[in-house]
Amino acid sequence: MLTLYQAEWCPYSSAVREVLTELGLDFVVRQVEPEPGDRATLRALTGGDSIPVLETEHGEILRGTRAIFRYLETRDPWLYAEAHRRQFLAHAYTREADVVGRLVTRLRYDRPGEDVAEGPEEAQVVHVPEESRYELRLGERRIGFAAYRRFENTIAFTHTEIDSVCEGRGFGTRLVRGALDDARGEGLDVLPLCSFVAAVMRRYPEYTA
């Protein structure tokens, strides 16, 4: 199997992973140290300390995106290659909004709030345009938000969060439907890049009519 030496934050590594995905190629990921000077194991294996590095099934070492891409261009495209590329381009909004960065910061800090006795119908959906999001509030407490990016007549919902004590109780649906109703009232085209927003739109066909 292919082995990719990489780091998640590295844009060159990310580009290689996308192409591997489009080609439908399974691969093993090996993480490297963040600082090049600390990558003694990588230097011993590849003769260098830069990433990404791809080791082929036959043990050939390919250093850098140019060499890796030249090799991958020899591989036949997967049946779903074009569909994956379309999704990659469609999700450009999430990369521009740094959705991944926001999610990473939740590690070790994302803790449930106090229990909520109220139901979803008692929560209010509030548009906060200066933050590019819709918030779900119970009184002064924010229990969730739906982030978006707006471009001309399109609103792209990129990420939705609900306090974990409220999950599975309909609060997320209340938030998303409120945001969708507002967007529809403004005559905006909705691009549901967030999987939860997409699921709500499938469940309520009036939002796709």
Image (tube, rainbow, N blue to C red):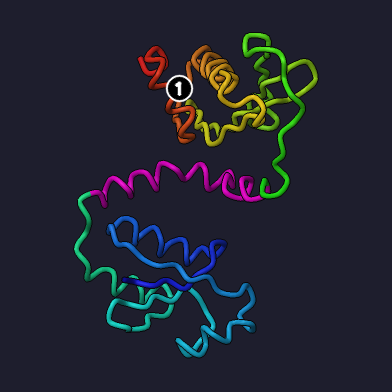
Q: Is 132 on the left-hand or right-hand side of 173? A: right
The residue lying toward the viewer, choosing from 144 and 128, is 144
For residue 152, above or below residue 110: above
Within the image, what quadrant is residue 171 found in? top right
Give neighbour class at mark 1: few <14, some 14-19, many 20+ (Cα, 10 Å): some
| Secondary structure mostly taken by the magenta-highlighted segment of the chain | helix
- Image quarter (top left, top right, bottom left or bottom right) of the C terminus: top left
- Residue under the point 48% across and 71% down: 30
In the rendered view, tell whether residue 158 sits above or below residue 203. below
Q: Nearer the viewer, residue 164 or 10?
A: 164
Q: Mark 1 sits on what residue? A: 200
- Amino acid type, callout 1: Val
The magenta region covers: 80-105
Q: Is residue 84 left or right of residue 187?
A: left
For residue 161, which quarter of the picture?
A: top right
Residue 94 drawn at (x, y percent): 52, 43
Q: Where does the image place residue 65, in percent across and percent down from the top left?
A: 41, 72
Report whether 104 appears left or right of 3. Answer: right
Q: Quadrant of the N terminus?
A: bottom left
Q: Please, is residue 206 above or below residue 201 in the view?
A: above
Examine the structure image and report whether residue 86 is included in the region drawn in magenta.
yes
- Name the residue rendered at 51%, 28% in the picture: 155
Q: Secondary structure at mark 1?
A: helix
The total number of labels drawn is: 1
Residue 142 x/y as whole percent: 73, 25
